[in-house]
Amino acid sequence: MKGLKGVNDRATINARLDAIIRLFCCLHSRDVFIKAYTKYLSTRLLNKSSQSTEGEELMLQKLKVECGHNTVNKLASMFNDIALSKDLMTEFKQSPLSTFIRDELKIEFTAEVLTNGHWPEQGNPACSLPQEMKVITTKFEQFYKNKYQNRNISWLYNNGSLELRPVYITSKPYQFVVSCYQAVVLLQYNRGKAEYTFQELRDAT
């Protein structure tokens, strides 16, 4: 929660959240607030941008008192997904499939596995991954399906980000932090072609 940046005292955190809840109790359209809160919470969890885990958990407890368990259940499930994903990635990084990605491809890979229906619905435009990215998703899918045979994975590329290092010579090294879609376009220039038309990039991606 951005409003709690730099605040470590539990009493201060509790007082600020109480003020939010008092305002919340005055709202006529609480469902609108919950929908917006769910959206921004999901962004904070996926981007690792929350300023206080304790504050997030306290807020859920207070919302549960005002709205009931059913309303807050999906929010709590989002926290559970993040915790389970952390354990899953620890297991994946010890597997031979991850070793191939790390040692052979020289790529660091992390993913969050989200339960369908617990997170806000998001559009996911069609995207054709280049081979450099496709081999990673394929390896992770193999690991996941070996562990959970009756589950399927749908990739939400709009939530992903990558760090790319250009290989051209400059006075100092640079690193690009880009979205998945930006990376898909940039990696087309690994094909040995210096220029593309918009239509060519669209057809390729």
Image (cartoon, helix red, strand yellow):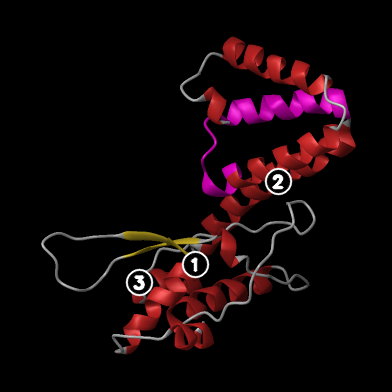
Task: Identify the residue at image location x=68%, y=50%.
Answer: 81
Answer left or right for 177 relative to 175. right
Residue 19, given in percent of the width and then of the height, sits at 69, 15
Percent across and percent down for residue 24 are 78, 23
Amino acid type assigned to the residue bearing label 2 in the image: Met
Q: Amino acid at mark 3?
A: Asp
| SS at mark 2 in the image | helix
Q: Which residue is mark 3?
A: 103
Q: Which residue is mark 1?
A: 180
Q: Nearest to the eye among marks 2 and 1: give it.
A: 1
Q: Residue furthest left?
A: 171
Q: Residue at x 71, y 15 (%)?
A: 18
20 shown above or below 82: above
Image position of 126 with respect to 194: above or below = above
For this rendering, which residue is in front, 68 or 37?
Answer: 37
The secondary structure that dominates the magenta segment is helix
* Residue beneath disc 2: 78
Give the residues drawn in magenta, as a range: 44-67
